[in-house]
Image (cartoon, coloured by chain):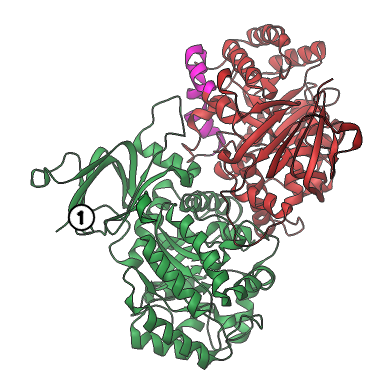
Chain colours: A green, B red
Amino acid sequence: MERFAIRGHICYSEDQKKIRTVDQGYVVCEDGKSRGVFETLPEEWRGIPCRDYGDKLIIPGLVDLHVHAPQYTFRGLGMDQELIDWLNTHTFPEEEKYKDTEYAKKAYHIFIEDLLHSATTRACVFATCHKEATLWLMEKMEEAGLAGYVGKVNMDRNSSEGLQEESAQKSAKDTEAWILEAADLTNVKPILTPRFIPTCSDELMEKLSELQKKYQMPAQSHLSENLSEIEWVRQLCPKASCYGDAYRLHGLFGGDCPTIMAHCVYSDEEETRMMKEQGVFIAHCPESNANLASGIAPARRFLDQGLKMGLGTDVAAGTSLSMFRAMAMAIQCSKLRWKLQDQSLPPLTVEEVFYLATKGGGEFFGKVGSLEPGYEFDAVVIDDGILRHARELSTKERLERLIYLAEDRQIDAKYVKGKQVLPIEKNCR
Amino acid sequence: MERFAIRGHICYSEDQKKIRTVDQGYVVCEDGKSRGVFETLPEEWRGIPCRDYGDKLIIPGLVDLHVHAPQYTFRGLGMDQELIDWLNTHTFPEEEKYKDTEYAKKAYHIFIEDLLHSATTRACVFATCHKEATLWLMEKMEEAGLAGYVGKVNMDRNSSEGLQEESAQKSAKDTEAWILEAADLTNVKPILTPRFIPTCSDELMEKLSELQKKYQMPAQSHLSENLSEIEWVRQLCPKASCYGDAYRLHGLFGGDCPTIMAHCVYSDEEETRMMKEQGVFIAHCPESNANLASGIAPARRFLDQGLKMGLGTDVAAGTSLSMFRAMAMAIQCSKLRWKLQDQSLPPLTVEEVFYLATKGGGEFFGKVGSLEPGYEFDAVVIDDGILRHARELSTKERLERLIYLAEDRQIDAKYVKGKQVLPIEKNCR
């Protein structure tokens, strides 16, 4: 049994309304799980190894519920279009390049290093439809010590010729081969990833649903991001009562297998009810929704109605891998939505966005996103010393400040499932 | 005559629609002014000292048209209220502390160091109503090599008791003394700063107008930021036809003396026309307007109507001193405004926000904000090497990426009026 403790100023979400802070507190890790947060180290653990991080902050590792690894190459570029044009102009041509596994390695190497040095410990990642490149990404993410789900993307229609898979059958066959090859991995697992309804034929969706039943796999996709997209889905799936129903009709909308739907900017009451019934997780991606001029999702309504939800950076429609930035944007956009669109939905609070970025998204992985007893030990140690203030700040205020001002260089140490992955020991590189 | 050149990948705004880039180009400085940007160094300047920054980017220094130095102590904190409550709860109690000049020195020291290490070369700064602290701030900004305007704030009503000045007469008298004491400074000059109509009596405004005429000084204030504020002004100044007119009636709304009005979120056609007639500069502060749930200013309309405009960080209603972040937010908020509020006003472009952050705001200072011949030599050298990409990027793309992703640590060198202020020579500290 491996046991150790870390010490510092600890913050974590108790629930959506409350952040608990313990100054100079201890978190105990036993076999990769937290045994809880303590003001003084309990008698039974006296003498276990303890690393004291002094005045630094300790928070649960952050959870990015939606990010596209191959798009990291053009983050911060080409933000001049809405969704469908942006996919055709910027995204599909870049993703085509990943059929060249050497290019993919070069690009994914940078993505993994930057993700490792961020405050994110878990991510749900879209790769491309290329099996080899996707497997390489998964293996290297695992080697780096990260945890999460990665999806080989499926798309057999309405994409660029060089990217689109040649048939539903071939797409499903490649997907099954990929699932089997990825079975050896421990912390980075495969997730079914039909890109979105417009690029997946009914036949492909049926085959993916069969794979899901056979392998009991989670799934991720996109939902109700943009009005033209929604209209397109209406034309493509006239039988569906709403966009979400187009997934549900194929058995790919939650239920037995955990499912993430990114965006939900325009999910109406019916679609929301369907997501709640099916236990679908919403990945709220406010920066992406601003950059592609999609709009602002009614995150407050989803919270109030008790839906499962986390935050996503959605690189590269979102520009930054920083989940702190995602939190800040979630607050800022909720204020603008309240002011400009719907005064019945009050803005999100610091407590709520921190919950979403930790426990809210973490729930997709089981007991993840907290330092409470029984949760997997994902923790990040942050040195906020570069943010000097003339006055004393409480631990809670320091966390609040980080949401708006954190940079990756402040990440001092990182633990995933109890294993320290940052700083990287020099002899391991 | 002092002459030198710097070399690198150069970007600057030619106008609102066009960014000119010159790879491995030269900018020549002569007596603090640019002599222009060249692909090869012209014959006449062969042999002058030249610092080659290799693959780094060179851009004009950025101009922050609106920032509150004393609020830097609580940046990133207390973002849970709208304007008036936020002023009473967070801002006024903090600004009171600056009557203690020792506290002010400690706080302003951090502000100046962080501003120095940012990409901003010029700023229009609100201090507090305390003369001594304001003078200290100005002297130390000048010593650090920064340029700009700093205002001792005026406020004789509707503020907290500990902050409010005891009378219009005392406020004006202190202001005149401060103007005279600040006269020795070269690069950091005084600017008249009535906080906003609600905190300035008619008598005070009249006295400030007299001071303006006597000393031919520029002015800065706030305008039409928040709907409750606008309603309050309507009650306080029933004679004014709009909020802007309340300044104009006292002779403090542009005209002969350059004037900045921050925000203008709700400026209607009449107020906009008045600003254009009077040559008023708008400081567009998108992050602040999101954080205080004020709304989104119609920056596209102001641009199309030919108003003078720049960007402001508005710390601490804005959280960050980064003008890159102000640029990104200006684009993002303009997209949300277009989507949610008014589809007749298309989003801002990268070209436009870069113009606003350089030449647009720079115009307040004269020929500032460009590297074209005759402009004051304010330049920033940026090392974007930490932002690795798997593909080749053009100089224009590297600039675009910085708008979304730049951090202060990437500022490699900085020149203000031809004087190098970063990196700081160790023996000068």
Compare residues B286 and A40 and report the one nearer the observer: A40
Query: How many marks on residues?
Result: 1
Res. B135 image quadrant:
top right
The one of B152 and A342 positioned closer to us in this rendering: B152
Residue A206 part of the magenta-drawn span: no
Residue at image coords 60%, 11%: B131
Which residues are the magenta region? B82-109
Q: Residue lying furthest front in this view? A: B47
Q: Residue lying furthest left in this view? A: A44
- Give the quadrant of the N terminus of chain A: bottom left
Relative height, residue A175 to residue A26 (above, below): below
Residue B264 appearing in the image = no
SS at circle 1: loop
Q: At 56% from the left edge and 91% from the top edge, which residue is drawn?
A: A167
Q: Position of residue B329 (x, y in %)?
A: 63, 48
Q: Circle 1 is placed at which residue position? A: A373
Q: Is residue B100 magenta?
A: yes
Task: Specify the quadrant that holds the C terminus of chain A.
Answer: bottom left
